[in-house]
Image: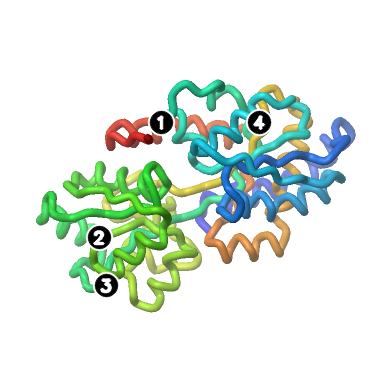
Amino acid sequence: MTRITRRAFAAGLLAVPALARGAAAQWAPSRPIRLIAPYPPGGGVDTTSRLLAGPMGSFLGQGFVVENRAGAGGSIGAAELARSAPDGHTLMIDAMAHTVNPALLRGLPFDYATAFTPISQVVVVPQLLVVNPNLPARTLPEFVAWAKARPGQLSYGSSGNATAAHLAAALLVQRAGLDIQHVPYRGGTPALQDVLGGAIAFVFGTVSSSLQLAREGRLRALAVTTATRIASMPEVPTVAEQGFEGYELNEWNGLYAPAGLPAPVTERVHAAAVHALADATVRQRLDALGAIPVGTAPAEFARYLAEQRELMARVVRDARIEVG
């Protein structure tokens, strides 16, 4: 877990008793809560939603019903939340696409910046920059030098256009000044297979998909995308500490309600989320998925969203990323 997320999570845990006492007398759900997962079943957001639903429901005294509303990069489910009543009975867990979509999608019936009440960033999913171990580069600076000596000859893969893996790589390519082609795959596994086979130069993979391959020596991990090193691979330096100050770009999930949610309800739902993230079983499952529990406060999450919308708009513009 990074130092930043450790601080945020610890602060959230300390806040739970006070939040629960202050908000409990003012609001309690009167019926089961819809938790929208704007992606298909079985994916990261769906898994996070179902992990948190049980303990959150126990904390609030009402059951949670996870509802998959997939399509259009998560914007269909987001539109459903945007038109729901701000009464605490409809929530959503969304991926980092929440801050990417404003730069990619046109004609949406809502504004991502104003249509929602941010409640908490619930998990961060770090990514590892991995290469074939037969490459001569053993550090990120060595890899950058190797790639710069081969302008226009190399390609990198991602789990799909405008995914976290693509955006993380695009930002690095921009910062490093590399002349290298993007190859989108239908998921992270085939991209990793082509790194293993030497068909592409590198890919950013999730910890859950890349860690074991790196430990077996089948891949070489050069960097991690978090601000500080991660506990599962403390020997792997961050991108930032290898000459790219300020670099940080991870996949993450956040919890939202419709705009206009009353403050006592926001506090109570946030307390429920932090309670769920402190659950030992939930944390064990998240660790197996390579996800780090966070639990930031609503105001801190709102600031983060504003920063991420700005960063994602810049990466999308500079890399000329488009969706069909």
Residue 137 is left or right of residue 64, and the answer is left
Between disc 2 and disc 3, the foreground one is: 2
Q: CA distance from mark 3 to mark 1?
A: 35 Å
Question: What's the amino acid at mark 3?
Answer: Pro
Residue drawn at x 33%, y 70% is 219
Residue drawn at x 36%, y 56% is 204
N-term mark: 2 or 4: 4
Residue 2 is left or right of residue 80, and the answer is left
Which mark, by number, is residue 200? 2
Q: CA distance from mark 2 to mark 4?
A: 39 Å
Q: CA distance from mark 2 to mark 3?
A: 13 Å
Which mark, by number, is residue 52? none
Q: CA distance from mark 4 to mark 3?
A: 45 Å
Residue 215 is left or right of residue 208, and the answer is left
Determine the image quadrant of residue 121.
top right
Q: CA distance from mark 2 to mark 1?
A: 26 Å
| Residue 213, percent from left and from top | 40, 72
Residue ID for mark 4: 81
- Secondary structure beneath disc 3? loop
Between disc 3 and disc 1, the foreground one is: 1
Residue 195 is left or right of residue 128, and the answer is left
| Residue 297 at least partly seen | no
Near mark 2 (Cα within 10 A), the count class, few <14, some 14-19 or many ≥20, is many
Residue ID for mark 3: 133
